[in-house]
Structure formats: C-alpha cells, structure tokens
Image (tube, coloured by chain):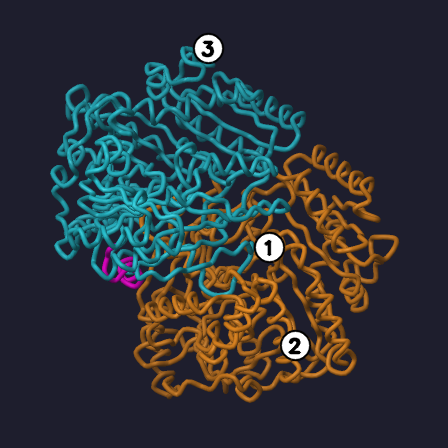
Chain colours: A cyan, B orange
Amino acid sequence: MTADKHGFSLTQLTSEKIERVKRDPRFKKLTDEDIAFFKTVLPETSVLERDSLTEAEHASYTCDWYNMFRAATQVILLPETTEQVSKILKYCNDQLIAVVPQSGNTSASGGSVPVFDEIIISTKKMAKIRKLDELRGDLVCDAGCVLQELDETLSQAGFQVPLDLPARHICRIGGTVSTNAGGIRQMRFGNLHGSVMGLEVVLPDGTIIDNLTTMRKDNSGYHLKNLFIGSEGTLGLVTGVSIATAQIRPAVNVFLIGLETFDHVVQAYSLARRELPETVAAFEVLDTSTVAIVKEQDFQIPKGSPFPLKETYPFYVVMETAGKDHEIENLRADRLLKLMLEKKIILEGDVARTPDEIERFWSWRNNVPRAIVQTGPTSIHFDVSLELPLLYKLVEDTRAWATKEGMIGRDIGAVYGYGHVGDGNMHLTIPALRDDESVRIKIDDFVYEWVAEHKGSGSAEHGLGMMKAAYLSFSKSSTIISQMRKVKNLFDPNGIMNPYKMFPTKEEEEQGEIVRKRGQVGC
Amino acid sequence: MTADKHGFSLTQLTSEKIERVKRDPRFKKLTDEDIAFFKTVLPETSVLERDSLTEAEHASYTCDWYNMFRAATQVILLPETTEQVSKILKYCNDQLIAVVPQSGNTSASGGSVPVFDEIIISTKKMAKIRKLDELRGDLVCDAGCVLQELDETLSQAGFQVPLDLPARHICRIGGTVSTNAGGIRQMRFGNLHGSVMGLEVVLPDGTIIDNLTTMRKDNSGYHLKNLFIGSEGTLGLVTGVSIATAQIRPAVNVFLIGLETFDHVVQAYSLARRELPETVAAFEVLDTSTVAIVKEQDFQIPKGSPFPLKETYPFYVVMETAGKDHEIENLRADRLLKLMLEKKIILEGDVARTPDEIERFWSWRNNVPRAIVQTGPTSIHFDVSLELPLLYKLVEDTRAWATKEGMIGRDIGAVYGYGHVGDGNMHLTIPALRDDESVRIKIDDFVYEWVAEHKGSGSAEHGLGMMKAAYLSFSKSSTIISQMRKVKNLFDPNGIMNPYKMFPTKEEEEQGEIVRKRGQVGC
C-alpha cells in the first residue's frame, strides 16, 4: 500500500490536484441500486465498498505506485469469470458508469487508477493457468496471473515468460499486455505484439471476443488482438492471454562495466550486438548518480555490499547474455570483455555468472525505481524513446536547464538517467521535494518539447495513462490521433472504458501539434 | 508471366469460373474521364491501359502466380509517390471505383489480383530505400522494394531482412507486410507485428497516415500499424515500411535428415529447440513424395544432382541454425546430429556449411512450390495452422479420403505435404489434372472442415485473399467476424479496397459457424 510503502502521506485526490480535466457529467454517480446489481453478479465479498475498507486498503486500488494520483472510487469489483466481467461491463455501459480495468496496479503513468469516481474492475481473482503446452511452451492464462508466478510454473517445463520487468512479483499479465509493457529483456524477447498469440477481451457492451488461439501463425482475418495490446484498457477489458513463451537459456553472463562517456556506451552496445548477436538479452545504462542513489538507499543486494567495480565512472552498463552452454557462453563473455577493454571502449568491467552474483549485479539496476521513489514525496519520471545517440543528451540538457532555472535543491532533488539502451528507451527520473503540480507541469513541458523536437516518443513502454495524455500530440500527428479517436468510438461509443486517459483535450492536441511540427517529426 | 511460366494456357476469367461472388453493381465501370483523370496525376507511361498491353503483360498483373484467378482489369496505375497514391485513392473513393493494391503479385491466395474489373495500383515504381541506420539496422523503405534487393543492401552493413520466403527475388515488402507473410525463418525472426516499427499507409479517402517511426518501443497511443499488417490491402494501401532488421549470423549449419514417422519429426523439433534454443532458425518438414517431385522436375541445385541422403525415408527435415562463431556452431551442430542418431530419433542425417552446400540442401525445400506447380494446369493448395502433433495427420487423412473417393489419377495427381514445423504450419498441396472448380470446392470443403474440427486455422501465413474468403468462419467466430466488419467499415466505408476478398458471404459465414462449433474450436 502506497502510504506504508513510501512512509509519506497519501497524495491529494487527483480531482483536487489536476485542473486539466473535469469529471464528465455524462457519467452516472453510483447508486445503491448499482451496488445491489453488482451483488447479483458477484458474491458480496467480491464487491468492495469504500466504507468497508481501511484507508490503506482503499489506496491500494485507488492510488498509484508512484503516489501521483488518487481517486474517490466508491466500489471495487473482483470478478472471477469472464462471464461476470461481461455482465458487469454491459450494465455499466447501459447505465453510463465509468470503469477502470485494473490488474496489478503497477502502471507508471497513472493508467490503472481512476481519476474521479470511476469504479474499478480488478482481475486479481482471475489468476488461473488455463493451459500449458509443454512441447512448445504455449501458455494460456487468466489476465490476473502474476508474472513471477507464471514464470515459476513455466520454469518447470523449461520455459519463461517473454517479458521481464522489476515489478515482476506484483504486476499481472493482463495489465502488462494492455500496456504493451517492454521491460529489461525486450532485446531478447521482442515485443508483446510478436509473442502474444491471442486474447480474450470483453468489450464495453459485454461482447466476449474469445480468440485464445495458440497458433503461431494465423492470418485468418484482421489481427484485432493487437489493437488491445497497448490500448491501456480504453477499448475493452483483457480477461485472458495466450502467449508463446521462451525457452530458458541457462548459461547467463551478466556484465557490469564502467565507461567514460555515453558515446562509449553506444560503441559498447554496437560491439556487443555484433559479437554476440544471438545471445545479448539486455543492455541497460545507468548514470553515476543513479548508482549513487541505490547505494544511498542501501537497495543493493546483499544490503550494505559495495558496488562491484573498483572505481566510479560517469556511466555504467548492465548487460546480460543468455545461451544454452555454460562453457561456451562463459568463454564468449570473457572474450568480449577483453575486447572491450583492449579497444578502450570500457574502463573497467566484471562478469557475474552464479545466481547470487547475477542477483547482486542486477540489483544495482533493478532497484533504481524503488530507490529513487524513496527520496521524495513524489517523483516526476519519463519514459521516452529516442534515436540512440540522443538518448543521454536529454538527461544532460534537462539537468542543465533545471540548474539554470534554479530548481535543483528548491523544487527537485536531482536528475537521474537510466534506461534500456538496447531499445532506445531512457527513463529520466526527477524526485520532487514536494508534491507541487506546477513544478511537474513546468518540467513536463520542457521534456516533452525536447523529445518532440528531437523526433522521439514521449511514451516508450509505460503507456500514456493519465500522466501523459496531455502530451500525446507531441509524439503523434493530429491525423493519427483522429484515427485513434475513430477506433475508440467504434469499440467504446459511450467512452466508459478508462476515461480521461490517453487522449489529450482538443486544445492540448493543437498545442502539441505546433511543437511537433516545429521538430519536423515524421509523426 | 503466367502463360510462359507454366507452359499452360491462362486460366479462365475468375468472373466466368467462380460463382460464389457477383460483381458489386455499386462499383463504377471505368470511363474515359477516369483514365483522363489518372493521366493528370501520373505520366502517361504510368497509366497502363489494357489495349496497350500484350496478353502476357496484362496477365502479369491480372493473373496470380498459381494461375487460379484472372481479371478483366482495364487499367493498371504505377504511382511513384505517396501523394500520387493519395490523389488516386481519393478519386476512386469519390467515384466508387474498386481498387486492388498490388506489389510483387506473389499472393498464394489470390489476394493481389482483381476479381472482376477492379483497377490495380501497383507499388512497383515505389522502390527506394529512404533510410538505413547502420548502427542498429533500422530500415525505412518504399513498399515496392523487392525483398532480395533490400537484403543485398542491408548485408553490406551486416544486417538482413527479418523475413525470408522462396519468392524473395520477386516479392515486394509492401505486399509481404500487408499479408503478414511468415516464411521459412519465422522461428528466428518472429512475426512482422514484432519487427515492423511503423508504416506509411494511404486510406481510401486519401488520408496519409505517416507513422514511419524507427522507435523500437513506442506506446504513444493505439498501435494502428498492426491493423494494416495482415489486412491484405482491405483497409488501406501501404506505401512505406519501417522495420527493425536482424544482425547477420554468418555461422550457418543446414541439416538434412531422414526420419521414420512424423512423431519422430516432432521429437527432433523438440530436441533441437532444447539443445540449440538461441540458434535454431528454421525447421521444415517434407514428405517423401514432395522430395520425389523436386527430383522429377529436376528443380534441385545443381540440376541433376542426387538427393543428399543415401536412402529414402518417409519424412525429411531441413533445419537451419545460425550463430556468430563458425567453430562453435559447427561443433554444436555435429553434437546435435550425433545425439539425434544415438537417440534413434533420426535414421540418417548430414550437415551443410559452405554456401554451395547450403544452397544445395535448401533447394530441396525452397523449390517445392515451383516443382509442384509444374505438374498440372493448376494446383489446390492449403496453408493451415494446427497443433504440432496433428500437423501431418491432415495430409494422411486427406490422402486416404481422396483415394477412397477415387480422385487420385482422375481429378488430381497426388497429395503433397510440406511445411514449417517450427510454426505449426502445413502446406498441403494437390496438383489438379484439370482446372475444374467443382473439384477444387470438393477438396476445399473437406480440408477446411477437417481443420475446423481440429481447431486449426485455415490460413497460417498466406492470408485469405479470394481463395479462402468463403472459409473465414471455419477459423473465426461470427463474433470476431462482426468486429472485423465494423473495422472494415470504419476505414473503408465504401468498400472499394480489395473487394470480394477476406470476407465470406452471410450464407457462407453461417455454414462455417456450424462446422466450427461442431469442432468446439476456441475461435
């Protein structure tokens, strides 16, 4: 729960804090009759009314992990079957009750919590594995399955979920699919549009689209499933997932290397891909201040242990390779490390290959988000895609700008940069010294303008959610947004599904279009 | 050109041969004014009128590679720019002129030729590479680029197109993307929904959706591009493609192995994936009669050379592995071959690793479609997805049924089975002794019913096109088809884009739904 987790008090209600959206008056305010209806569909224990919950319990559904948004939701529903979801959604659609689909509630962009009083349909109680084909590793499961638990089951048959992210122990597959989450091993696994074979989705009118096929190839008609992957619950509610999983590759080497400049990081990336094209599985960059914050919060594993490298450097890379044969992969890893040192691309490096060592090395990367979150009441964080050589320039330019504006020490703690070099995805993260919406807006404006002018995307893997809805048109043209609106209207004509998210207001859209055009972005 | 290629005369006009669809009277018959308009947009030499073409030239656009369909198209347009495509489509949409988008015209399901008198917009003259990022291998190119030519350019920078199919020398990337083509190395490269990063698409109303991003991760809004990948030109015309290409892995080993039963093929597949999870790139099965037909037609390379194995076997597998280091990969390949022999999974096997040897081994697989096509005036071919253990049962059951019906030698030559075991995709192919629509329908009915009853898909990688439109509801539920119709109507309300393809008639849809339900297919 957020309050306990951070040791800070809960953030203000979103409705009091954020001015840019008003509650849509078309949406019905929940009545006793509505609650009574829900209790005809679900057992009473699966209809969580606000008055029956502690503040902490309520916040675990209505406040996001980053403590940025909080809603005044009256009821949280916990269906156990797809048919129950269908009945609930049909009722909400008929009654114009706004709905937020939620699974693990780990969205990093305020995509999984309501804004005002939308009800929550949680998939928590839909957590069964429906089918596991041990020959090929095809998995069919409910949307509420926790990623790590799926991994544990799969590992017994020699497979693993083709997606990995630091929230693996709490995030649920329905949410990761709806967000099109990327994570730290996308280099190896590819994106979810590639690995998800089929979905079961309930549309707002209650229609169940059952397409839980396990066909690797199925060109019989439009690939509708892909519309729901990454649409953040705005078109329908994902209740089931069919996914092609990956064969476990047991011979893992994790490199931790120190580098002088970001240009060297790019060189190291390029060399690693050329030398080990079939086994590079992750390539993550951390700047020196990001490593310092993990140490400061004592978030490394084991606690209190020193950083694995002897010296400090401006940049660090955590790189993982994964193959079948230990002997071969260890040899190739050692050879690459030697080559990088010889070519003076890196200044120092070490390789971990036992489970404990691997966990130790990775902890300096995996615990960055949690370490930063601890340092302030809230944080302003970004998840942008850029051309590789520009990836760290954003961090440098933001830091220089914030310094010039006198914001560091007054409004914000520092500017951290870390991310997935392999996918051109930077997480710029700025802990705020207080929860001040005007500071957030000022920084957001600077960063999203910068990204638009450098032809990037303001959302790489986290989705737009509530946090970045205003900035969609910095990344996408009005032509594309207008097609998106048509699709939204087709599947959710009443607009009840996860409202206020993803789409900008008309005014925001026009402002963004001007900035985007200035950058001559190829939309 | 079809007539020359096969040495047979051209097939009947589709309109005379196929009774299930009638020309939609809403569509305008082309007038001199229309031709005059096209000549205001394009140079005269890019407006190919029927009267100015030889029969062979006309057939190269209006007849498919399998010689199954032929249209009476009056004009073929060859735009060079996206803006020209936009002007043409807008005009056609306003005038209700039906349009078939075409690139390489290699569709195996009659998806790229008109049915009646639809005009053709060919992307042949749009064949420029727009951008190639040598750091990461990101490629942005026109829709009309030939796959093999792209590969040749990419190879200079160490990359390759993440798609490979026997028609690589003539197929064009716009068509492969619109079909969501799979090919022989999908095991390695994944599907196009995973590797295509962005598209430029012209909608029927002339709107240009420019989303040629090179972001590996871009969750800013709906992933609309995925709707156009695999929609067979029925929603819009793809004019540009941005694709993440694959690093070349030079250490290639190609196995050719002989096996006793299909169950052994499955065992070999499973073992290969477990032993070489990071390098298995292709795993293709051929039955003994398929190998015989390549030999009979002398389509192997070099011509006249014997089959690489000493004995004949009921099944053969061509398997490819690709890695970075020759020494390591050769060692691992030899080890796997030895293991397969020791475990008695295979009866004989050999490995090719020089370019000539690799070409020789692969020729026995790659030239199968061409070899079969030579044996009759037309062929009845299938492209189905099934659970792996069922993959060859379809071939056996079809052969037994055709024998029992007395069709072999009277209506058809033989029943061949070959396909992509790695993706659960079988190409059942039956050369017909004459071009008789009633024979085709009889065999289609048997096979698509069989596939529906075994919960497979009637189209794995070729798309539905004209050939399989009637059978869509054998693979997809009416619920899904109704959503597809809504999407079609959203993007192409006048229905001018590639009409008569993909969708069944209402009557066909109802019949298929009965069969599908009988098989209790999870749609």
Give the magenta part as a residue range: A484-496
Q: Which of marks 1 and 2 is nearer the N terminus?
A: 1
Dot 2 amino acid type:
Ile
Q: Are marks 1 and 2 in contact (CB under 8 Å)?
A: no
Nearer to me, B419 or B3 = B419
Residue at image mark 1: B164
Tell whether B293 sits left or right of B446. Answer: right
Residue farthest right in this picture: B310
Q: Where is residue B143 in the image (x, y as percent from the top left)?
A: 46, 61
Dot 3 amino acid type:
Lys
Tell whether A275 sits left or right of A496. Answer: right
Residue B443, numbered circle: 2
Figure check: A410 above or below A26:
above
Most common SS among magenta residues: helix
Residue at image mark 3: A310
How packed mark 2 is, by other alpha carbons closer than 10 Å (few <14, some 14-19, many 20 or more), is some
Tell me the subunit letter for badge 2. B
3D distance between C-alphas at marks 1 and 2: 29 Å
Q: Position of residue B208 (x, y in %)?
A: 32, 62
Figure check: A6 above or below B173:
above
Q: Mark 2 falls on what kind of element?
A: helix
Callout in the foreground (2, 3): 2
Residue A8 belongs to the span the image colors magenta: no
Q: Residue at x 12, y 48 (%)?
A: A22
Q: In which quarter of the image is residue B261?
A: bottom right
Is residue A64 at least partly visible in the picture? yes
Q: In which quarter of the image is residue B486?
A: bottom left
Q: Which residue is drawn at 28% across and 34% down?
A: A60
